[in-house]
Image: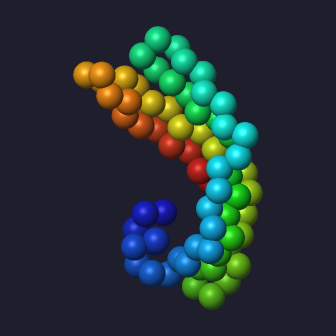
Amino acid sequence: MGGIVRSGRDKYESVELHNLRVYFHGEIATVIGHYSQKGMSDDKDNSATGPYVDTLVRRNGCWQIVSSVLP
């Protein structure tokens, strides 16, 4: 998705995350919630909602995202 956003083909009016919950498992954290977006892609509506999941690992005292699911 990042390349498409940089190309200028996608224009977003808003992207929001909702109902986020964080679960810790030692040095691993999982963030679960929902997303909603409003926007256009190649002049077509690409508004959507769906699940949102990030997985993070704590390395050298810092949290780093190792997986992000945003369909």
**In the image: residue 40, left or right of residue 61:** right
Coordinates of residue 15 in the picture (x, y in percent): 62, 62
Question: Residue 65: which quarter of the image?
Answer: top left
Question: Residue 41: which quarter of the image?
Answer: bottom right
Q: Is residue 50 above or below residue 68?
A: below
Residue 19 in view in this figure: yes
Looking at the image, the residue that sits furthest to the bottom is 43
**In the image: residue 9, left or right of residue 31:** left
What colouring does the structure picture have? rainbow
Say which residue appears at 65% left-offset and 50% top-offset.
Answer: 17
Q: Is residue 7 above or below residue 52?
A: below
**In the image: residue 13, left or right of residue 58:** right
Say which residue appears at 63% left-offset and 68% top-offset.
Answer: 14
Residue in the foreground of this view, choosing between 59 and 41: 59
Residue 51 in view in this figure: no
Say which residue appears at 42% left-offset and 16% top-offset.
Answer: 27
Question: Residue 8: which quarter of the image?
Answer: bottom left
Coordinates of residue 10 in the picture (x, y in percent): 53, 77
Coordinates of residue 64 in the picture (x, y in percent): 37, 34
Coordinates of residue 35 in the picture (x, y in percent): 68, 52
Say which residue appears at 60% left-offset and 27% top-offset.
Answer: 22
